[in-house]
Image: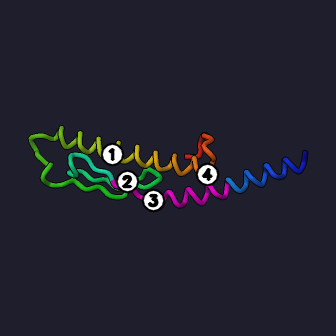
Amino acid sequence: MAKNMNNLLKQAQQMQQKMATLQKELEAREIETSSGGGMIKIKINGKQEIIDFKINPECVDPEDVDMLEELVKTAVNQAVNESQEMVSNAMSKVTGGINIPGLF
């Protein structure tokens, strides 16, 4: 019984080390998304931090601020969703598909 418990603890420690390594790797990974046919571009990392943000001057129309706001909102939401999906996929490889709350 003690041997099984030791093996379980070793496996948990190995998973913890893999997760720490993966978290550092994810921080360095970047995804670029866009909206409005490339008029708004956002680069985001695995921590869901926006690293870069570009607005094509052609889509800046003082008469239609609502459209610009919608394009920005769409691009940000898409970037966050793709980043979360990237993190989720990477984490499931480490955890074997088990959802462990609070990891990310």
Sequence-earlier tag: 4 or 2: 2
Label 3 secondary element: loop
Tell us which disc is closer to us: 4 or 2: 4
Say which label, 2 or 1, has the lower sequence index: 2
Q: Secondary structure at mark 2?
A: strand
Give amino acid for label 1. Answer: Val
Q: Which residue is mark 3?
A: 29
Q: Position of residue 16 (x, y in %)?
A: 67, 54
Query: For the N terminus, which image quadrant?
Result: top right
How are the residues colored?
rainbow
Q: CA distance from mark 4 to mark 2?
A: 25 Å
Crowd class of label 2 (few under 14; some 14 to 19; many from 20; radius 10 Å): some
Amino acid of disc 4: Val
Q: Is residue 17 shown in magenta? A: yes
Q: Is residue 103 left or right of residue 2?
A: left
Residue at 54 percent of width and 60 percent of height: 24
Instruction: Tell me what residue is drawn at x 81 percent, y 52 percent.
Output: 7
Residue 21 highlighted magenta (yes or no): yes
Q: Which residues are magenta?
A: 16-32
Q: Earlier in the sequence, mark 4 or mark 3?
A: 3
Circle nearer the viewer, 1 or 4: 4
| Residue at image coords 62%, 54% | 19
Q: Residue furthest left?
A: 63
Observer-side mark, 4 or 3, equals 4
What residue is pinned by disc 2?
A: 50
The image's mark for residue 76 is 1
